[in-house]
Amino acid sequence: MKSFSRFFSYLGQDIAIDLGTANSLVYVRGRGIVLQEPSVVAVNQKTGQILAIGKEAKKMVGRTPAHIVATRPLVKGVISDFEVTEQMLRYFIDKVYKKKLLIGPGPRVIVGIPFGVTEVEKKAVLDAAYSAGGREVFLIEEPMAAAIGARLVVQEAGGNFIVDIGGGTTEVAIISLGGIVFAKSLRVAGDKLNEDIIYFAQEEYKIAIGERTAEAIKIGIGSAYATGREKKELPLRGRNIVTGLPEEITISADAVRKAMEKSVRQIINEIKIAVEETPPELLADIMTNGIHLAGGGAQLAGLDVLITKETKIPTNIVEDPLTAMVRGAGLVLENLDELRDVLVETDSLEPPK
């Protein structure tokens, strides 16, 4: 059966998917990353029809009539709307998967999931991927995939410390001998930082702004620690909640850092807890190898400096942190026989054959 499945894997185009709260990335076996789109779906609520997925849907956020809703089908890294997630997965698979036979099998699919999700949440991902056309579906925990994508030596007896900061969750994990020694999934990440900026603008300046504006401010001048290299200020445009009229002010990097301070502190505290929970021998390795930051949130200016300052452990941003997770899942896909042990056990959740 394995050789039969392997034969079909060469006929098809097996794929790895980083099904993120904010963005989804798709890796095709033998080709690398071929798709990177927002995890957004626009739905006509009157008819139930899906109007757009990905980039086209994100353009509609905050700009649609009442009966059209641009929504994210994943919340904090887990599926909140099964049917819409299935449609989004089918869209991604159809976009990148080209059958080489007129009648042939669908692709084998590896999907990343946050650490510690429930059996019900795992089954929801499995079912959605099978319904979207997957022939075989495997799950991999996001911190493990990010560590493999960062080219950490996860299968040897040595401590690897990975922090994967996505849109919905921050995954903190210690990995050794192909397994997770300690991990925690914190539902504070990029989206929460955007919410902090929205709340701060409303409370401090009495200006209502949207998610897209908050994210642009975060990317433009957001920082976790004043390094002196970041830009100092940007214009902030929104609606004055007192007068109801449009207004533009200038917001400083210091103000944005203050807005995000509490959430950044929560991430730092989880990292400290992981350090405290790490066995001494592994901690000695980590002090040598350092803490590795992956995910879009790793790009927050000064975060690596702040973590180094707070933990006394050198902290490095992995190469291309946004794609580390899907690259890791892709490497597992390319070397499935050798790396099968790092996958999540799902035999009890599989649909009947």
Image (cartoon, grey):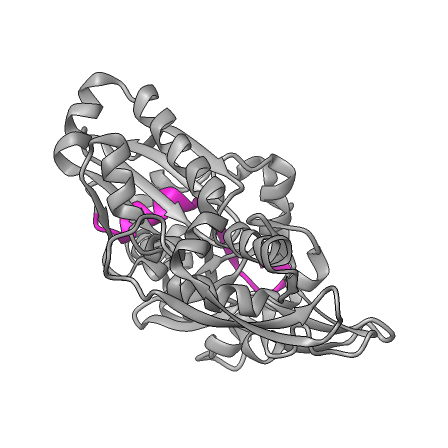
Q: Position of residue 279 (x, y in %)?
A: 26, 18
Residue located 68% across and 51% down the image: 80
Q: How many marks?
A: 0
Regarding residue 147, the answer to whether it shows in the image is: yes
Residue located 42% across and 46% down the image: 142
In the figure, is residue 219 to the left or right of 127? left
Regarding residue 107, the answer to whether it shows in the image is: no
Q: Position of residue 12 (x, y in %)?
A: 42, 71
Q: Is residue 225 magenta?
A: no
Using the image as rendered, state which of residue 35 and residue 45 is in the foreground.
45
Q: Position of residue 189 (x, y in %)?
A: 48, 48
In the figure, is residue 167 to the left or right of 33? right
Using the image as rendered, state which of residue 20 and residue 178 is in the foreground.
20
Using the image as rendered, state which of residue 130 and residue 19 is in the foreground.
19
In the figure, is residue 297 to the left or right of 346? left
Q: Residue furthest front?
A: 243
Which residues are drawn in magenta?
129-151
